Image (tube, rainbow, N blue to C red):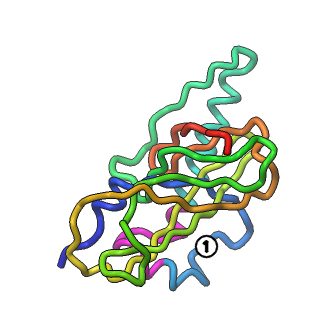
């Protein structure tokens, strides 16, 4: 039975807002759509850890302004990696670009995507969630440029957007 782990490895992930109730309770439908070993709760925890590392790096940089990030403690992180984010610094809505399935979940080998942010004072981590047509399908390993829009609790302002997989900054393009 082939799973779509290639899409997790090839795809891109986005930002997540830390909100009350970030446990996996109530997320059973989303968790069922994620590859084995991943849950929305795990992805949110991973995003919070990435924010903590970034926030610590900002504190360590002090007035020098050069933020140096330590690598994440995980070897093969779950989640969809994001390639870039489109939006403005004054906006509360961002669009994450990543690699994913060619078509929607209503089609064979397709997937629907949505994104949620996890936010701190210094950064935003984007979590992209895929809902596949059928996780047991055998599909080509070709990836296609896809997008998912997310809403922030407050404008992006001077915060950076981090990739959930590695906790590294991703490019922001005005849109």
Q: Which residue is mark 1?
A: 23
Q: Is residue 136 left or right of residue 117?
A: left
- Residue 117 image-quadrant placement: bottom right
**So how many labels did they put on this image?**
1
Say which residue appears at 56% left-offset and 25% top-offset: 68
Based on the picture, tell me whether residue 144 belongs to the magenta stretch.
no
Residue at disc 1, secondary structure: loop
Q: Quadrant of the N terminus?
A: bottom left
Identity of the residue furthest to the left in this view: 1
Residue 4, compared with residue 146, is above or below; it is below
Tell me residue 67's x, y (percent).
Answer: 61, 25
Say which residue appears at 67% left-offset and 21% top-offset: 61
Tell me residue 144's x, y (percent).
Answer: 37, 58
Q: Is residue 162 left or right of residue 154?
A: left
Instruction: Provide the residue span drawn in magenta.
Output: 31-43
Q: Dot 1, crowdedness within 10 Å: few (<14), some or many (≥20)?
A: some
Residue 62, compared with residue 150, is above or below; it is above
Q: Is residue 162 left or right of residue 73?
A: right
Q: Quadrant of the C terminus?
A: top right
Residue 78, compared with residue 59, is above or below; it is below
Q: Is residue 128 left or right of residue 80?
A: right
- Residue 44 vs residue 138, the one in the foreground: 138
- Residue 172 vs residue 169, the one in the foreground: 172
Tell me residue 116's x, y (percent).
Answer: 62, 63
Say which residue appears at 58% left-offset and 64% top-offset: 115
Say which residue appears at 54% left-offset and 39% top-offset: 170
Residue 133, compared with residue 145, is above or below; it is below
Tell me residue 163's x, y (percent).
Answer: 52, 46
């Amino acid at each position: 039975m082939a799973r779509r782990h290639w899409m997790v490895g090839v795809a891109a992930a986005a930002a997540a807002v830390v909100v009350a109730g970030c446990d996996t309770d109530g997320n059973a439908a989303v968790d069922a759509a994620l590859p084995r070993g991943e849950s929305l709760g795990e992805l949110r925890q991973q995003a919070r850890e990435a924010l903590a590392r970034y926030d610590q790096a900002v504190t360590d940089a002090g007035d020098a302004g050069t933020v140096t990030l330590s690598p994440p403690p995980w070897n093969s992180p779950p989640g969809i990696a994001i390639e870039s984010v489109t939006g403005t610094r004054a906006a509360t809505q961002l669009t994450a670009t990543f690699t994913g399935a060619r078509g929607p979940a209503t089609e064979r080998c397709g997937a629907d995507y949505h994104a949620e942010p996890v936010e701190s004072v210094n950064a935003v981590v984007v979590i992209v969630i895929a809902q596949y047509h059928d996780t047991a399908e055998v599909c080509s390993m070709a990836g296609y440029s896809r997008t998912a829009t997310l809403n922030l609790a407050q404008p992006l302002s001077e915060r950076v957007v981090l990739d959930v997989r590695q906790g590294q900054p991703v490019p922001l393009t005005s849109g």
